[in-house]
Image: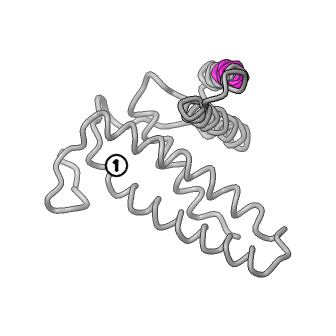
């Protein structure tokens, strides 16, 4: 059975762009949930307005990206993805933080001219890589991150993004 394509000129997505799209949807889903959970705590009206703007922007981003999921490569029939509740959210948030930290340290090192600062950043980069590994394997062992099953990974993205989109705030 052929899947409906969201855009007429769109065919199938390539594997690499599918994985990049997964990273964006996963990261933004967690971000949207965090914003929606915390907007009521924001007292400053201008900041609250920025939160509302960010919520709308992430909502639009997720809706647009989810439209491409039917064009993603699928290697098997659809699978059910277990919902692990808040533990999946908190672990995913920690994984995103660790991954972003590794990327930021990598960039910072390329801009560093002071040798002693470069050594400190390199040490902290290694620590960030180790944290990322610890969180990744924690999630993998508990079935929270099906890294070796593309169908489960993408179905989990859709479920998490749908939950984030439907969450009231």
Query: What residue does disc 1 label?
Result: 69
Picture coordinates of residue 115 (x, y %)?
67, 21
Q: Is residue 22 left or right of 46 when viewed as pictured?
A: left
Q: Is residue 96 visible?
A: yes
Picture coordinates of residue 75 (x, y %)?
29, 29
Q: Answer whether residue 153 is magenta in the image.
A: no
Residue drawn where x is 39% and y is 34% of the image = 151
Badge 1 marks a residue whose secondary structure is helix
Q: Is residue 142 visible?
A: no
Residue drawn where x is 52% and y is 57% of the image = 162
Q: Is residue 166 above or below residue 136?
A: below
Q: Quadrant of residue 107?
A: top right
Q: Residue furthest bottom?
A: 45
Question: Magenta span: helix, strand or loop, mainly?
Answer: helix
Report the quarter where the C terminus lies. Answer: bottom right
10 Å crowding of disc 1: few (<14), some (14-19), many (20+):
many
Q: Answer whether residue 124 is magenta in the image.
A: yes
Residue drawn where x is 63% and y is 53% of the image = 31
Span shown in magenta: 120-130
């Amino acid at each position: 059975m052929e899947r409906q394509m969201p855009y007429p000129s769109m065919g199938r997505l390539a594997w690499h762009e599918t994985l990049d799209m997964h990273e964006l949807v996963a990261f933004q889903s967690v971000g949207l949930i965090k914003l929606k959970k915390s907007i009521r705590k924001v007292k400053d009206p201008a900041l609250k307005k920025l939160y509302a703007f960010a919520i709308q922007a992430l909502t639009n981003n997720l809706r647009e990206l989810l439209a491409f999921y039917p064009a993603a490569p699928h290697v098997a029939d659809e699978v059910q993805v277990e919902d692990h509740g808040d533990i999946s959210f908190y672990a995913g948030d920690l994984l995103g933080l660790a991954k972003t930290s590794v990327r930021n340290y990598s960039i910072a090192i390329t801009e560093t001219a002071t040798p002693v600062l470069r050594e400190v950043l390199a040490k902290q980069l290694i620590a960030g890589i180790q944290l990322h590994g610890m969180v990744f394997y924690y999630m993998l062992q508990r079935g929270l991150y099906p890294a070796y099953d593309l169908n489960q990974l993408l179905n989990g993205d859709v479920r998490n993004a749908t939950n984030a989109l439907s969450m009231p705030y």
